[in-house]
Image (cartoon, helix red, strand yellow):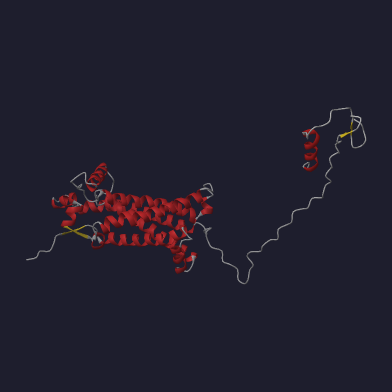
Amino acid sequence: MNTKPTTYTRFPLARRIEHIIMLLSFTTLGLTGLPQRYPLAGISVFIVDSLGGIDNLRYIHHIAAVVLMFGTAYHIIVAGYKVFVLRTRMNMLPIFQDAKDGWQALMYNIGLSKKFPQMGRYTFEEKLEYWAFVWGTIIMGLTGFLMWNPINSTKLLPGEWIPAAKAAHGGEAVLAVLAIIIWHMYGVHIKRFNKSMWTGKMSEEEMLHEHPLELADIKAGMAEQSIQPAELRKRQMVYYPIAGILTAAMLAGILGFINTEETALTTIVPPEGQVEVFVPQTPTPLPTLAPTATPLPSPTPMPVSSPQGATATVEGQVAETAAPVTGPSWDGEVSPILQAKCST
């Protein structure tokens, strides 16, 4: 007789829908954001052309960003309800045991330990992914606001913050996409296909392998604590006004994010008709300098021997008697030639 395997509810329907919305918005942001960071790549050109141009690409990118912000606001409100009203344990907060589990897993993976760490509701890997997403959302939101509203941003901040925000936005985008492709895809879909975010349930075998401490708490009746209806209503009456104020503030922030200014990144529509966009200029000739007379070197007397033993110059002037020159000398022959030929 076949018995149906025992399953445990891990994620309710609302969490699964939230996951799908965040997955779609994140994927859209990646597909429309990376082509703007690497515009000359072939795949980037293909995506831009497929979506009808850079304006449509940016429009879709902005819509996905707004969806991500609404999803983040909803997640904050729900997390507050679970913590304050339902008194759910904050199992996603990192603790020192997570570092020990990470080290134990590393030793197990490289063969230096025979025991894999036992973990509870969330593993250290899931916590790293969650808080990396939180950190990335904060960075992308702040830098995205600076780029979406550069004029008003520079009224409060130096202008250098805009290109710095662009660099941080693109760098964080690359990091986030690579983390999903490498870390998340391997840990959730390749190493062991975890279907709990789609079905909402995990089998007892999967729980024993991935979350043995949580399974032990469930079997011991310690996983969920019932709340008296009166106490539940009391907490709800306190939390609902706070949640309403937080919701209004976050909605106002999102609307301000969108409508603060007409972004400076709007593409200018080209004018109609034939417009000559490039007119080559004729280079201006350099002025010609007037020729200047080059002074000729003064003639140097050349010594000529006379029959009387005196030395006479070519002009007929007689110099003092000297011994006949037996060979070429620098002062007599070489220097005058250099002065005549190389004076310029």
| x and y percentages locating residue 331 in the rendered image | 79, 33
Q: Is residue 44 left or right of residue 16?
A: right
Horizontal side of 146 relative to 81 (left or right) equals: right
- Which residue is found at the position 41% from the left and 59% from the top? 65
Left or right: residue 303 compared with residue 87:
right
Camera-side residue: 305 or 174? 305
The percent position of residue 328, horizontal first and vertical second, equals 78, 35
> In percent of the image, x 43 and y 59: which residue is there?
34
Tell me if residue 123 can be seen: yes
Q: Is residue 125 above or below residue 32?
A: above
Which residue occupies the foreground of this view, 239 or 298? Answer: 298
Q: Residue 282, image x and y in percent?
A: 70, 60
Q: In the displayed image of the protein, which residue is found farthest to the bottom?
A: 273
Residue lying furthest left: 1
Does residue 249 appear anywhere in the picture?
Answer: no
- Please tell me which residue lies in front, 52 or 264: 52
Camera-side residue of 155 and 331: 331
Q: Position of residue 266 (x, y in %)?
A: 53, 61
Above or below, 55 relative to 123: below
8 left or right of 142? left
